[in-house]
Image (cartoon, rainbow, N blue to C red):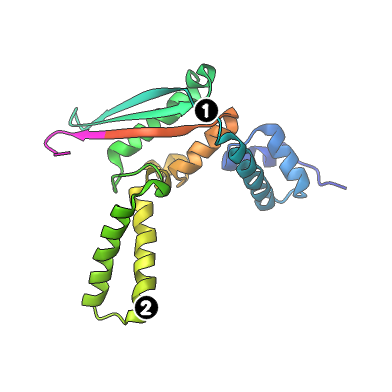
Amino acid sequence: MSAAVSAADVKALRERTGAGVLDCRAALAEAGGDLDKAIEILRVKGQASAAKRSGRATSEGTVASYIHSGGRVGVLVEVRCETDFVARGEDFQDFAREVALHVAGAPSLPEFISAEEITEEARQAERSVHEAKAREEGKPDEVIGRIVDGQLSKWSKEVALLEQPHINADRYAGKTIEELRAELAAKTGENIQIARFARFAVGEDE
């Protein structure tokens, strides 16, 4: 016999996952009322759905802008989706603006959209820096590889936009840009992608 699912539990699960009411209720029922198990169920189902969506064409979308610091910093972000209906929706527009805001103020300025897009040239340059530093510090050869791999993993999260927690940590509970993108994709049922971004600052060279 499945556990009774309360409205409060459904509300709590929605707040933590962004999933729909019916999906949350079904996940809680399947998990016997265990919130953490329900989150995992939704995560697995969400990954399966995302995999199906990821190959679908994104020919609609929007270009969002954000101007900061009295007009001294500006960002343009292109976010794509599948239909004009979703592109014009408030949730989609808000997400695009929030990504632009994040790029404008992120402590570590993103250089790539995802970790997968980091070029081999950039990775090798970063690897060389950390290898040289480890040797200067007298680290044994047998541990240098592990040290460098750890530093590269940390670095990739700093320079990849999707890996970064949104700058407004309080509002988004520390969620990354990718987590926010995935939530919007699940909510809209469409393939949502950040296509490109550009940041401009007065007095800074390209």
Q: Secondary structure at mark 1?
A: loop
The span shown in magenta is: 199-206
**Residue extending farthest left:** 203
Circle number at residue 100? none
Q: Residue at coordinates 45% horizontally, 45% vertically from top-left?
A: 176
Disc 1 or disc 2, which is closer to the eye? 1
Does residue 5 lie above or below 147 as drawn?
above
Amino acid identity at mark 2: Val
Q: Is residue 197 magenta?
A: no
Q: Is residue 6 something that shows in the picture? A: no
Q: Quadrant of the C terminus?
A: top left
The image shows residue 109 at horizontal and vertical percentages of 28, 45
Q: Earlier in the sequence, mark 1 or mark 2?
A: 1
Nearer to us in this view, 203 or 129: 129
Q: Is residue 144 something that shows in the picture? A: yes
Q: Residue at coordinates 27% horizontally, 70% vertically from top-left?
A: 131
Q: Residue at coordinates 64% horizontally, 37% vertically from top-left?
A: 11
Does residue 63 lie above or below 16 as drawn?
above
Q: Which residue is mark 2?
A: 143
The quarter holding residue 69 reads: top left
The image shows residue 151 at horizontal and vertical percentages of 34, 64
Crowding at dot 1, Cα within 10 Å, few <14 / some 14-19 / many 20+, comes out as some
The image shows residue 144 at horizontal and vertical percentages of 33, 75
Left or right: 72, with 12 as reference point = left
Distance from label 1 to label 2 (Cα)? 45 Å
Q: Which residue is mark 1?
A: 57
Q: Main secondary structure of the magenta part?
A: loop
